[in-house]
Image (cartoon, helix red, strand yellow):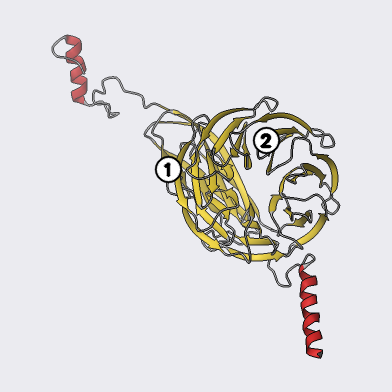
């Protein structure tokens, strides 16, 4: 009998521990719970400045003041026309909501205390998730694939392009000229450089069904349920390839990336922090167990915002870094088609434990991971290049534009090789004198 009561006491202790927030006893990442709210039911979350925007499916949208992370305060709640809210994205003073059967909804939050619905677009099928880039909203709409909507005028959004994916489009993330779309066990890279005519560049089958996607640099991170966190290298958009993975204790349901850390909402095992400084060998460095399934996540600045369904959401301070990183890039303002253009960079890390990594994007789909490199443009035009240097979760970015013009043809250069030979000079003279045909 005594043994029975001891067993019951132990079981009760374990249950109590898992019914409240629990932090790890040993961790190289010291997650600190800063604040929490029991309401609203948090199923999607986006953060901008001093506000968190929480989607609650049938409970609509909540606006939360997070200027004091230790004491978040509800500022507004909208329910009308927002039932079925699936996903929230923020750009400037507007929210873009994937509203299921209600399509894409646009909310003006310039006055956070009085958010106002100002526009909408119906999608052919349910709008499941949304990502923003510039003046465009990218909506994963199930059987209707990826829908691209121009929101330059938020009060009159208009669809301008779409791409029907072979499988349902369920989750989407956007970076630069590419949208990364998942559905079932498929992962697709869509070229959106011309938003009116999106084109698939590459695709792979993933080990698990993705329920969240995030992109950082040349890597895409998939929350893949029981298959954990998967890391996809997209440096060559035509041949995406899985380069690393790590299994999480339960179900990786959502992911956000900041610097060299991936933050995973892992249902009943709460928040997991993964070091992805080496994408090929991700390593868990911290966790925090929450009382209910962690289902959505956002990272902004020094804080992580974790939605845990019926138990509201939690605010954590992120893992600290003492690394400071500055950089320079040296690229000519102009050159010609076919020339070997020099791209040079310097990195100045201070207090960083890892060596800097380099990522060039040349603006014509070309990329390089070398610190200093050369690139040849095949066509004339204005190309925006970007350099991203990373170390210990810190990044330094430089960007600029190079004007590439057509290679000039020299007078008398009959064969167009850029050199005028004595023979070519003689041909021109003969032509002038009428002795023979000029080149």
Q: Position of residue 139 (x, y in %)?
A: 60, 38
Kind of element beneath mark 2: loop
Q: Please identify, in this view, whether the residue under mark 2 or under mark 1 is nearer the observer.
A: 2
Kind of element beneath mark 1: strand
Residue appearing at x 85%, y 45% in the figure: 74
The residue under label 2 is 102
Residue closest to the eye, 287 or 412: 287
Residue closest to the eye, 43 or 178: 43
Find the distance from the CA under tag 2 to the CA under tag 1. 49 Å
Residue appearing at x 18%, y 19% in the figure: 426
Asked if one can make out residue 233 in the rendered structure from this viewpoint, the answer is yes
**In the visual, does 43 lie left or right of 239?**
right
Asked if one can make out residue 29 in the rendered structure from this viewpoint, the answer is no
**Marker count (numbered):** 2
Vertical comparison of 206 with 62: above or below: below
Q: Where's the C terminus, which quadrant?
A: top left
Q: Position of residue 172 (x, y in %)?
A: 58, 44
Vertical comparison of 203 with 432: above or below: below
Q: Quadrant of residue 144?
A: top right
Toward the left, the furthest residue is 435
Report crowding for label 2: few under 14, some 14 to 19, many 20 or more residues within 10 A (C-alpha): many
Vertical comparison of 344 with 406: above or below: below
Report crowding for label 1: few under 14, some 14 to 19, many 20 or more residues within 10 A (C-alpha): few
Residue appearing at x 77%, y 51% in the figure: 41
Residue closest to the eye, 13 or 315: 13
The residue under label 1 is 374
Q: Where's the N terminus, which quadrant?
A: bottom right
**In the visual, does 194 lie left or right of 159?**
left
């Amino acid at each position: 009998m005594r043994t029975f009561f001891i067993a019951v006491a132990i079981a009760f202790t374990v249950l109590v521990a898992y019914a409240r927030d629990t932090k790890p006893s040993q961790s190289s990442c010291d997650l600190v719970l800063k604040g929490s709210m029991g309401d609203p039911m948090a199923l999607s979350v986006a953060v901008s400045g001093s506000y968190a925007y929480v989607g609650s499916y049938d409970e609509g949208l909540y606006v939360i003041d997070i200027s004091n992370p230790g004491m978040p305060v509800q500022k507004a709640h909208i329910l009308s026309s927002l039932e079925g809210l699936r996903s929230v994205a923020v750009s400037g003073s507007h929210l873009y909501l994937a509203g299921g059967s209600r399509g894409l909804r646009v909310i003006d939050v310039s006055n956070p205390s009085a958010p106002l619905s100002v526009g909408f677009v119906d999608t052919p099928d349910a709008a499941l998730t949304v990502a923003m880039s510039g003046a465009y909203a990218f909506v994963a709409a199930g059987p209707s694939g990826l829908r691209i909507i121009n929101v330059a005028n938020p009060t009159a959004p208009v669809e301008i392009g779409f791409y029907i994916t072979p499988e349902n489009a369920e989750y989407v993330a956007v970076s630069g000229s590419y949208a990364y779309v998942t559905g079932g066990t498929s992962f697709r890279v869509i070229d959106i450089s011309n938003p009116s005519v999106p084109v698939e560049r590459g695709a792979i089958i993933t080990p698990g069904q993705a329920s969240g996607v995030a992109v950082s640099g040349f890597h895409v991170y998939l929350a893949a349920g029981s298959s954990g966190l998967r890391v996809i290298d997209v440096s060559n958009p035509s041949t995406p390839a899985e380069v690393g993975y790590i299994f999480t204790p339960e179900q990786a349901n959502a992911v956000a990336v900041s610097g060299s850390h991936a933050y995973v909402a892992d249902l009943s095992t709460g928040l997991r922090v993964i070091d992805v400084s080496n994408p090929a060998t991700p390593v868990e460095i911290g966790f925090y167990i929450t009382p209910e399934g962690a289902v959505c996540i956002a990272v902004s600045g020094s804080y992580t915002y974790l939605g845990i369904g019926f138990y509201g959401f939690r605010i954590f301070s992120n893992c600290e870094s003492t690394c400071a990183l500055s950089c320079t890039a040296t690229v000519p303002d102009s050159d010609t088609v076919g020339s070997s253009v020099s791209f040079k960079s310097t990195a100045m890390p201070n207090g960083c434990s890892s060596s800097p990594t380099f990522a060039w994007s040349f603006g014509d789909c070309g990329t390089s991971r070398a610190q200093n490199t050369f690139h040849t443009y095949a066509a004339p035009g204005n190309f925006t290049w970007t350099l991203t240097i990373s170390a210990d979760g810190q990044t330094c970015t430089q960007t600029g534009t190079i004007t590439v013009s057509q290679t000039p043809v020299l007078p008398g250069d009959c064969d167009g090789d850029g050199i005028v030979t004595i023979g070519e000079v003689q041909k021109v003279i003969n032509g002038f004198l009428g002795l023979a045909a000029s080149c």
